[in-house]
Each structure stands twice: as structure tokens, then as C-alpha cells.
Amino acid sequence: MGRYLIGRLGQSVVVLFLVSLIGFMILNLAPGGPLSQFALTPGMSQADIQRLAVQMGLDRPLIVQYIDWLGRLLRGDWGESFRDGRPVLAIIVEHLWATLLLMGTSMAISIVVGTLVGIAGAIRRYSIFDYLATVGAMVALSIPTFWFGLVAIYLFALKLAWLPAGNMITIGDGSVLDYLHHLVMPALVLALVNVAIWSRYMRSSTLDVLHQDFVRTARAKGLPRYRVLVHHIVRNALLPMITLGGLQLPTILGGALVAETVFTWPGMGRLFLDSIGYSDYPVVMGILMLSAIFVLLGNLLADLLVALADPRVRLA
Amino acid sequence: MNDNDNPIDKPFLAHPNRRQFLGMAAVGSAGLLLPWSLARQALAADVGAPAGRVTIGFSQEPTVFNPLMPHIEVDDGIHWNVFDPLFFADPQGDFVPALAMEVPTVANGGISQDGLKWHIKLREGVTWHDGTPFTAEDVAFTFRLTVDPDFRSSRHAGFDLVQNIEVISPTELRWEMSKSYAPFSSILATTFIVPKHLLSDDPNQAPFNNAPVGTGAFKWKERVAGDHILLEANSDYFAGPAGIEEVVFRYIPDLTVLYTQFKTSDIDVIAMQGIMPDHYQEAKGLSGKTVVVVPSSSVESIAFNMERPQFKDPIVRQALYLALDKGTILDALYYGLPTPTETYMPHESPYYNADLPQHRYDIDAAKKLLDDAGWKPGGDGIREKDGVRLSFTNSTTSGNQVREQMQQFVQQSWQELGVDMQISNRPPAVMWGDYWMQSQFDSVVVGINFLTGSDPDVSNYFRSDSIPAQNGGGQNTFQYKNADVDRLLAEGASEQDPAKRQPIYHRIQATIREDLPMLPLFQYAYVRGYKTGLEGYEGNINTRITTWNVRQWHWA
Amino acid sequence: MAMTTATAISVQRRPHWWQQRTLSRFLRHRLALIGLIVIVTLTLACVFGPYLLPHDELTVDLRARFSPPLTDDFYLGTDPLGRDITSRLLMAGRISLLVGFSVMLISTAFGTLIGVIAGYFRGWTGVVLMRIVDAFLAFPSIFLVLVLSAFVKPSPFMITVIIALTCWMEIARIVEAEIRSLRERDFTVAARLAGASARWIMFRELVPNAMGPIIVAATLTIANAILLEAYISFLGYGIQPPLPSWGNMLNSAQQYLTNAPWLAIVPGITITLAVTSFNFIGDGLRDALDSRSDLQ
């Protein structure tokens, strides 16, 4: 086990290195670049753009730029944004917490609701409720988020004026209540999709547990229904959900890109999209490396958990 | 990046034009000398103590706060409020002194007869937001920093001609130019002065760049990246404090959401990129909102890459122009908002040539023109001549809905002519990178503000040595070459007298209208709006952004 | 490990999807059946429908712009250029469904191949392949989509390739996990002892037995691909005009949500309908291939 872990970690470092190399290369080789945004600026000419490229070191061979970037990264220096010149890590941390707030809330809602709906659906399989939940989940999964978000804004902000149309806080307010007020709509819109995912997984996971021997034994022993449900069924059905949660962790980093755009939420997804749009390579690379670390850890965790749960799968 | 959102705005309410352009020829290029009271009125609201807050929505995020570093127009929206230039161009195109006591001209002796020696007196008693006095040293520093080889300066043009800067006293300086260069006044009018004491060591990385300190009507308060920027009134502003206490700039990336937030009053002012033409009718009917149409000096055109064999024949360019149903495009797709044009020059400019031949839509004439010139339809209906097929791509920034509609409409019109135009749009970073700069396109739809400030010089776009694809330093990506235009441009730039410059720029416009390196479509007009009750809102065609004069705004 | 007999092998195997019980289970899954009917109908409508309509999808008529549904013979109204939405919707369906199917085929084939090889050869081959999968997974799909689309001229083909590039890893992981568990089963061991070649074992023994999860993942991939195409259009990198796709129809409609809501509702509902149907089919297949569902 220990050896396997060390091996996997070693492999992960290699993968991380490859991801950084490939990411850096395709990013820099892609047509465009950080200076193309200045193309039509009055008074700026090709001569200015060429001079800036030299000053920013963008004219150096790509491999030299990469080694420079990697060397600084290994010394803990993530570089500075091409856009506002601030340290990449500081920028990421700022946006990360906005995303965590939004994703955390919506995740909490979707886990609670999704779990309940999933269990209920499994216990009353093929009931009206189960059908409605299934259809509801499928439809929720299939609605494009940006479309749904715009409709929600139209309804709740414009027509009913119950909720703000977007943003994270009212400037100058910043109270908890104000946060919550702004959080409701994006969190619920995002949660809709996640409730669907969680309820589907929870349903099938509960079905798996329902027919296992220990449940029958518990029932045969005459334990009260809710005790069997809570102690035996739900507890065991939740186990695979941990894996799912682990696998969903990295998606937090990518942020809820669409929801953040529609609801003007200053999170990671928006930052990532803007950074790609303006070819802000240092920030893009920073987010890429962080998300790669998350994905690799998540995958490793999932593999370990599967191995622990299923002894037939030997770790090699 | 967004070529169509250079919000160089013109006031909605027409002011009486104080300038009698030709009559003032003797006064010099820089406009009337405004008496102090007038200048003061042009600078501040003059309505007592600052009060209230105004929230402004931008569809792009301002991120560059050092005004000398490369930035996009949305950053200007912050610079205008935190910093001051020596003088600036007001909506009528007249220069108004800001940090300078008066605008240097040949007439007042600020510029020597030969255009080589400049002399400026500065306002006294001006301080930076941190309390440090503002002096001529700061101006000299700004000039030097602009061309400092180690500094990531946005542009060198004009400043690379400055030499022998001499600080005479804390409020007086002079310098020489290595050649007479008339556009320099316009360049100065868009150059903000930065503090020497905060940028002396490593100006690329100074803390100043993220917490700017200026002399302007508003002080920097806070920035939440990705969300908003907050400024507060500078009670010590030299022209008297602004009418608004706090200004919030909100970043709202999606245009539909931007408009929705305007409707829900989450924002008070919808700045760039404003309200889409499709929403104009609806927006006019909103209660409690004032919706205005502000012209801009950006001109929309279909530009050709003149080195492509399809476009070498002037007959082809003329025929394509004839087959362009401009009227329908403007009326149906743009709701008649923009002004049709025949030139790159904004109509408000005193250099605008109003006598250019008017475009007409006549597809039969276009067909005949091509037939006569030997461009005959091939087997598939596409015209060809000497092995060159009239088939090409047309590109623009992807995601611009109305423009994509126009492309599809033009595509159908030209198909009728026997011309095959394929749409191949690209994301902005790709579109305006080498694809545009190195002339890798066939044709593009592009909105360009051809002028720097209010000066009529367009050497950057039309001189034959400005072609980047042919090792030029400018932005003549049309690869347009005309020896007459080259000569006229050089002549116009060195001439200081506006009366003598006017005929030169008229001829340049006439030649370009004849050569058609680009088919001029219209001069932009933007739909903007603000909450009724806000006063002092005014567009300015000589700036890139509608938030250039927030200092004059106030709530009724 | 004990020697196994031929009967033991068949007992160990999962039922094939074409087996009677599987099929009947699928047909009993009412939602899946509805989904199948919807998809077949939609596909037929997209293939033959445009020939029956009075307008084609490209003719611009600015006098007829923004006609609401049921104006004259514009059954679903017209778009901002006065083009018939019905025929655009069906022509767009050809592209969107084709993109969906092609992505499914490419990513399933590729993902299965990688997954089988990685699962069967467990030494360095497996490690290297799975770490490549990890590396691809480590790129957020939005990064791959945006950066790669900067390299290519957007066309239905390139968009298919780019979406497929972001979709195959899931399948590879699912297949690898499945194979890893199957290769220890008795029938595989028996085949190996009988001297069967690796290729024979992989593609004749293991893949057919892993078919269940593969088919399920494949249907879900189609659904995903259709949504991704819409999403790419939302970001402005999608299918180029004047060619319609469900994604770019929906995207170009968002600014007319208040004054011409049918522009957004028509493609929005169509996408939802198609994706939901594919998800139902996937769900039905999952139940049908899972013999436990008989126990109920």
C-alpha cells in the first residue's frame, strides 16, 4: 500500500510536469497573444507592440520562457498577471473564495436535497414520486445553465424584483444578510443541476444496498424501519457518494463558469475565462496547475477508495 | 480588443459651436483660450459639496491603472477620474486647460512659429492625492518615462521627438521637438500626468500601478478584482470638488445582463458597451431612465487585404460597394441609429470632407461593371478572371450578434452578384493578433477609430510604410499603397496651421474614397442610458469613454 | 485458482445487450422507450423535414424579421434576419445530432481502446496510458475547448474533434476499471490458460462483457456533446454563421429574450428534449443491463 502510494505520487509529479509543459506550449503557440488586445488602440502601432513583446520577454524562444516560468514556480513564485501586474497566487486566492462561497452553498443544498430525493426514489421505486423525480432530474440536467439563469433573472429580479440581478454584495453593505440575498439565485440555479446528479447517484446507490444481506438480516431481526433505513441503508449508500464528492472537488476550481458570467459573480470561472480571453498566460497557467493538482489528487483518492471497497481490485 | 466599442462620444445635447473653425485659423491649432471661469466650469460640477453615489456598469474589467502602460478603453474610464492631462479636448473639439494654465499655441507663443519649441505654464497649488505638491518635475518625468526603454509604455509616438526638456520653475517647463509634429497637441490631450515620487524606482512593478495616486477629481478607494472599483471625491480638487461623493465601476461581463441590471437599477449608468440597438426601442420607454444616442468617432467598414488577387482590381472593390445595401443594413439591423459615411473621418471633425461621392445601391450597375471588366461567372455562378475566383473569407470578432447578422445579409447580397463570401469569425485575441496585424485575412468587418484624439492624422493606417506585413511599424493592415496619400500625410503632419491642413486632409479622404481600400459603412452611434435625475452626463467624441467627466455629474 | 469449466464461464458473464431479457427490461422502462421514440422522430424530422417546408434555412428577408410563431407559413416564427425558424431548427438538428453522434463514436472508440489496453496490460503500459488519461483530465475542458479552437477554423468537423478530445477520458477510465475487474474473473483466466492471444481476449472476451457500461457512457456522451456545442456557441467559438446549430440559435437568441422570446424558447426546448431523451435511454440501458433490477 505504502509503496503503491509513493509510486502513484511519483507518477503524478511526472503527469503534472507534462501538463505544465503541454499547457504552456499550446497556450503560447495559439494564435493571438496578450498584445493583440491593443491592436486597435489609437496611437499604438505595430512598432509599440513589438517593443512591448521584447520588454515582456515574449520574443524569447518558447522553451526558454518555459524554463524561466518553471524555475520561478519551483521557487514558489507563480509570476505576475499580464493584466494588472499583481501576483498570480493572490489573484487566484481572491477569486477562489468567491467561488467557494457560491459552489459550497449550492453543493450543500444539492447534497441534502439530492440525497433525500434519491433515497425516497429508491425506496418507492417506480412510484409517481420516483417518476417525477427522474423526469425532473433529467430535465434539470438538460437545460443549458445560461438560458435558465437568464430566465431566472428575468423572473425574479426584473418582474418580481425579489432578488438582485447579480453581483456578490451591495457596495458599502457587505452584511451576512446582504451576501445571502445575493447568493440565493445563483446558488439555486447551480444547485438544480447538482441535485439532479446527486439524486440519480443516491438512488442507484441506495438500490444497491437495499438488496444486500445485512439489510435483510436487520429487517429480519425486527429492527424498526427508520433504524434500518438510517443505520444500515443510508449509511452504506452514502459511502460511494464520498468518492463522487472527491471527483467533483476539482470542478470547484473551474468554477461555475456560466453561472458566474450570468450572475456577475467574481469567481474562478470568470477569472479563467477572462484570462484566456486576454491571453494572460501567468494566470491561466496558475489556474491550470492548481486544477491539475486537484484532479490528480481526486483521481488518486477515488482509486484508493475503490480499492479499499472492492478487494478484488488489486493495486498494482 | 473590442474594436466596436471605442466609446468616443459626442454630447447628446448639441452645444452651440463656439469654434468658428476657419475664422480662427490665425489663432492656431489648439482652439480658443478659455477664460478661467469657463475652464473651471468645464472641469467641475460647481454644485456645492459632493453628495451621493453613482454606479456605472462596464462590460469589461478595468485592470490597468497606470495610464502610461498599455491599456484598453475601459481603463480610460478610471484614468479620466483619477488623473488629469495638461489639457484635453472638450466635446466641441476645443482644448481646455487642466493642469496647464493655458493651452500652448503658435498664437500665444506656447509653440514657436516653426513648431519646434514648446513652453508651458502650470497651475499653482495643485497637490497629488497623497498631499505631495504637483510640479513641473512630474510633467518632465511623465515625458521621459513614456520613452524610457525599460518601461512598458503604451506608445512612443510624439514623445520620441521630444528633446531637451527643461524645468524652469516648479510651474514652468519647456522642451524642443526634433521636427514639427502637429498631432502632438492631441497626443498631450490624452496623456495623463503621473507622480514622479511614486514611480521613480521600477515603474513596471510599483505599488502605484494598483493603487493609483493622481491629481484628479476622484481618489482611489478600493478594488475588488472581478467585481468593482470604488472612487471617492477629492475634496482638494483644484477646480473645486466633484458633485458625486462616491463612484462605483461595476464589471458585468454579459451584455444582456448589463442591460437587465440597468433596468433593475442595480446600475445607474450603462457605460460601455451600452445598450444594444435591438433594445433601443424598448429602452426609450423605460420609466425613470434617460436613454441617449451618443455618436462616436469609430467608423465601421468592410476592409480588404489589398494584396489578395481578388481585391487588386479596383473595379471589384467598386462593384462590391455598389452591391452593398447600406440603407437596409442601417435601417433594419441598426434601427437607423448610426450615420452612414463615405470616409474614415468623423463628421464632427472640422477636417471632415462633406463633398465625397455618395454611395448608391445598384446591383445591376455592379454586375455590369464586373461584366465589362471581364469578371465572368464560372460554372458554379462565381465570377472569375484570369484564374482568380471572386471567392474570399470575411472575418470579425465572434459573438457580435448584430455584426454577424450584417455579415450574413451582405453575404446574400454579394452572392447575387456572383461573389462567394464565406464567414470565418474568430475570438478577439485571435482576430486582432497576427491575423489582423500581419494581414492574414481576406476581408474583415471592423470598427476603427482612425484618429488619435482630435487630430486628423491617419499615417498609422494609410501610409505605405506603415504596413506590418511588409515590415512597417504602423497598422496599415489593408496593405494600402498610394504615393499621393503618402506625400499628403507627411505634409499634413508637419503643418501647424489648421486652415492649411484642412485641404490636405480633404484630398486624402477623396483619394481613399476613390481607391476603396475599405468600404465605409457608417460612423458609430451608441445607445447609452442613465437614471433620470443624474445631471451633467455628456458624451465626448474626442475621448474613448463616456465616463470622462464624472466630476461634472451630480444628482438633481 | 481453480480450473473452471465452460458452464462456469457463461454464468460469470454479464448478459449481452441483445439478449431477450435485457431487451424486454429496456422496453419495460417506459421513460427510456419514450426517449427512444423522441430521438427517432427528431432524427427523421431533421433528415426529411427540411424538404417539406415552404422556406429554406438561409433565405434572408428583412421585411419578415421577428415574425412570431404561426405568422403565415412560418410555423415557429422567424429570426432577426427574417429566416424561417422551423427549417433552421431542423437543419440545425442535423448538425447538432451529427456532432453528438460523431463525438460519441470517436470518443467511445478511442476511450474504449485506451481503457481496454490499459486495463489488460497492467505493467508500465497500463500505468503510462492511465497517466496520459489523467493528464488530459487535468486540463479543464473549457481550457482545451478555448485554446484549441484558437488553432483551427471553426467548422462542424473541427468542433466535433475538439469536443471528442474532451470527452474520451471518462470512457477510458470507466472501461479500464471494468476490465481491471473482469480480467481476474475465471473466464478470462481460462481463456489465457487455453492459450488465447491477448488481442483475442481483449476484444472477444473482455470488451463484449464490458459493453453495458460502455453503451451507457456512450449515450450520456451524446447528451453531453450537444450541450457542449451549445456552450461553445455561448462563448462565441461555435459553428459559423450562416450555418445553424441548436447552440448558436440559442446563443443568438439571448438578447431577444424579452421582445422575441420564441427565438430562445424553441431551440431551448429542443435541446432539453433531445438531451433528456438521450439521458433516459442511457438510464434505461443501465437498468436493462443490470440483472439485479429483475429482483424487484
Image: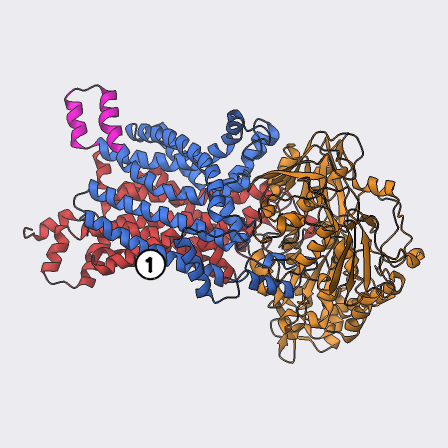
Q: Position of residue C171 (x, y in %)?
A: 32, 52
Q: What is the total number of numbered labels drawn onto the structure image?
A: 1
Residues in magenta, as a range: A211-237
Instruction: Indicate yes or no whether the magenta region holds residue B365.
Output: no
For residue A220, above or below residue B169: above
Q: Is residue A227 magenta?
A: yes
Task: Say which residue label 1 marks.
Answer: C110
Rendered location of residue B405, percent (x, y): 64, 53
Does A187 sit left or right of A2 as displayed?
right
Question: What is chain C's hue in the picture?
Answer: red
At mark 1, the secondary structure is helix
Q: Is residue B112 above or below residue A206?
A: below
Q: What residue is at 34 percent from the left and 36 percent from the top? A: A200
**Of all residues shown, which one is farthest toward the front?**
B169
Task: Categorize mark 1 by other alpha carbons within 10 Å: few (<14), some (14-19), many (20+).
Answer: some
Q: Is residue B451 visible?
A: yes
> Outermost residue toward the bottom?
B386
Q: Which chain is orange?
A: B
Residue C23 against residue B179 in the figure, above or below? above
- Give the x, y percent position of residue C23: 27, 45
Principal secondary structure, stretch drawn in magenta: helix
View extreme (left): residue: C2
The answer to whether any part of residue C101 appears in the image is no
